[in-house]
Image: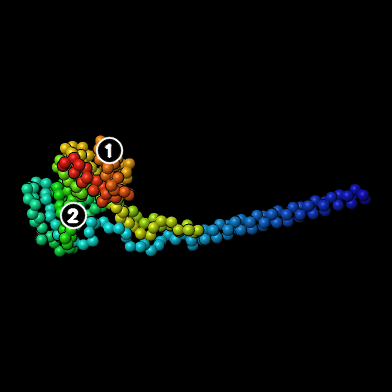
Amino acid sequence: MIAFNMTSFLNKLKTLYGIIAVLFSFSCYGQSDQEVQQVNQYLNAKDDYRYDVIPHFYTKDSTQGFQYFSHRWLRGVVIYSDNQMMANSDTLHIDNSRYYNFDKYNNKLVSSQNGKNVLYLPNDAISKFILVDSERVYIFKKVPEISKSQYLQPMVENENGYSLYKHTITKYKRADYQNIGYGETGKKYDEYVDSYEYYILFPGRKDFKKLSLNTASVKKIFKDNSATVDEFFQQNQGEINEEMLYNLILFLNNKAGY
């Protein structure tokens, strides 16, 4: 009798353990599935938030800066490489049949008769051109001793002394705006940005050097004339700009008798 009851009890206990195990496994599975759903919801919520605060598209503002030298067409004169016009004459014969402008970005002279049909003139065929804006005259020329392709603006030209030239470099920068949720970076507009280089052509017109608008650069280039340069700076205080550089070259040429 006792053995029979013990066996029955053990069988019932095994059955109970089995039921508990099954219930426990279902409970664990349900909890795991719920946690997975919660994680997915969290990640999806983060994705939705991200797309809300970082737009893929935005309204681009108008382009800043300018690709061309002037905002309007100008009268001018073109001197071709095989043309000796004005070589022995100071007379400025303005071409009234066409309009001109200078594409700084592409280093190209452009021309038009009606302001609509634009013609890019061949770079290698032109040695010099002049643009006339009301009473102001702008000269662009190739200086073979410095560059055979880039157009430079002469600021001071002296056949025997120092000459000073300016080179305008125009670069195109695309809009790089970003909204990163906690702040904004970049610009919403494309931009043409000008920078300038200055070249000194030494007496004899064989050597040249590029300089920057600072005292150290100027003194280094004119170290052979340090006394004259120091004299100039004693009379002219302040930061070096285009006007001061222009006056310095005139001062050096005058002191040397050029």
Query: How far across and down, in percent of the image, does residue 3 sit?
Result: 90, 48
Q: For residue 126, which numbered disc appears in the image?
A: none
Position in image of residue 20 (x %, y %)? 76, 54
Q: Nearer the viewer, residue 81 or 35?
A: 81
Q: What residue type is labelled 2?
A: Tyr
Q: Is residue 95 left or right of residue 202?
A: left
Q: How crowded is mark 1: few (under 14 residues within 10 Å), some or many (20 or more)?
A: some
Q: Residue 86 appears at what percent x and percent y?
A: 8, 50
**The image quarter in which residue 57 lies:** bottom left
Of helix, strand and loop, which one carries label 1? helix
Element type at mark 2 = strand
Question: Which mark, residue 138?
Answer: 2
Check disc 1 and give the amino acid type.
Ser
Compared with 57, 140 (above or below) is above
Q: Which of marks 1 and 2 is nearer the N terminus?
A: 2
> Which residue occupies 14% across, 57% down?
76
Quadrant containing the C terminus in the rendered view: top left
Residue 226: which numbered mark, if any? 1
Going by the image, does 116 lie left or right of 88? Answer: right
Residue located farthest toward the right when viewing the structure as drawn: 1
Towards the viewer: 108 or 250: 250
